[in-house]
Image (cartoon, helix red, strand yellow):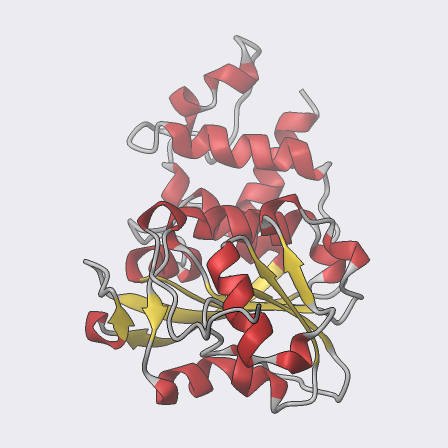
């Protein structure tokens, strides 16, 4: 018996699905990958019914798609036979990206909003295999990612990502171009890995300093960093500042000085 034709996949709330239905925006996102040598390895996260996928296929990329939703997988297999052997059924957050991408790899997607930050941190953990990320995010998350120091939206995700990636806010997307429409505006951003970034301290320690500094962001760093200084004498010119006032290089210097305690 042949499978019945599958005309549409219903968005599932628990997967954070909001299917983009505007073809023009889909094409703009797909073509926002800045460097497209033929055969470049690209992973699309959460392709759904393939609104971005079709435009990525047109670019002659070495494309693989990662999809957790069985209905979407069935739809893709039926409507995009060119993806034969290129559909990874599973959770992107559990993938070892080094097995699928090389140093010029790219990750793209209309990311599920409930795990969009986790997707970025997963890419950060595999930064040697991710040269570029292009994604749709909830607008306020996109603004946090691209925020500069001194801005109230500047936080942990801003510092950690901008340490290794140049971030660029591309454009805002309104609710009505999705099915179902989300309750918030969205935005597309592009991140491109910086070359030859070498921190003065191990990354896990740097990350801990940044997270600790922002955990009590209303306090000065003198108080916020007590879990790290643990009563040790630590005099530093940044201690009377708040975390949001420090640039990326300031955080690196602070972490280096704390590491020497």
Q: Is residue 122 above or below residue 48?
A: above
Looking at the figure, which quarter contains the C terminus? Answer: top right
Q: Residue at 47%, 23% (x, y): give it.
A: 225
Image coordinates of residue 206 in percent, x first then y, are 62, 36
Against 139, residue 83 (above or below) is below
Q: Quadrant of residue 201?
A: top right
The x and y percentages for residue 18 are 33, 63
Q: Is residue 97 left or right of residue 17?
A: right
The residue at the point 49 percent across, 75 percent down is 50
- Which residue extends farthest top? 231
Percent from the top left, x then y, of residue 78?
56, 75
Q: Nearer the viewer, residue 242 or 95?
A: 95
Is residue 197 visible in the rendered image? The answer is no
* Number of callouts: 0
Front-most of 221 and 127? 127
Q: In this rendering, is residue 21 above or below 226?
A: below
Residue 101: x and y in percent read: 76, 64
Report the side of 113 relative to 133 (left or right). left
Quarter of the picture containing the N terminus is: bottom right
* Front position in the image: 163 or 65: 65
Q: Foreground: 57 or 204?
A: 57
Q: Residue at x 46, y 35 (%)?
A: 238
* Residue 230 visible in the displayed image: yes
Q: Residue at x 47, y 71 (%)?
A: 4
Q: Quadrant of residue 233?
A: top right
């Amino acid at each position: 018996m042949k499978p019945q034709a599958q005309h549409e996949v219903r968005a599932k709330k628990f997967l954070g699905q909001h299917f983009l239905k505007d073809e023009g925006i889909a094409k703009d996102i797909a073509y926002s990958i800045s460097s497209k040598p033929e055969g470049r390895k690209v992973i699309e996260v959460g392709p759904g019914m393939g609104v971005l996928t079709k435009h990525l296929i047109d670019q002659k990329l070495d494309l693989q798609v990662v999809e957790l939703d069985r209905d979407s997988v069935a739809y893709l297999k039926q409507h995009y036979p060119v993806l034969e052997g290129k559909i990874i059924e599973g959770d992107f957050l559990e993938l070892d990206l080094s097995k699928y991408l090389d140093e010029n790899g790219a990750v793209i997607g209309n990311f599920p909003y409930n795990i969009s930050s986790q997707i970025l941190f997963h890419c950060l953990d595999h930064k040697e295999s991710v040269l570029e990320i292009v994604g749709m995010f909830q607008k306020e998350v996109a603004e946090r990612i691209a925020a500069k120091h001194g801005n109230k939206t500047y936080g942990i995700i801003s510092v950690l990502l901008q340490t290794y990636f140049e971030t660029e806010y591309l454009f805002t997307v309104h609710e009505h171009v999705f099915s179902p429409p989300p309750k918030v505006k969205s935005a597309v951003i592009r991140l491109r890995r910086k070359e030859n970034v070498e921190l003065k301290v191990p990354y896990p320690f740097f990350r801990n300093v940044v997270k600790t500094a922002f955990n009590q962001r209303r306090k000065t760093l003198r108080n916020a960093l007590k879990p790290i200084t643990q009563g040790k004498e630590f005099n530093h010119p940044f201690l009377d500042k708040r975390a949001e006032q420090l640039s990326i290089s300031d955080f690196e210097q602070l972490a280096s000085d704390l590491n020497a305690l």
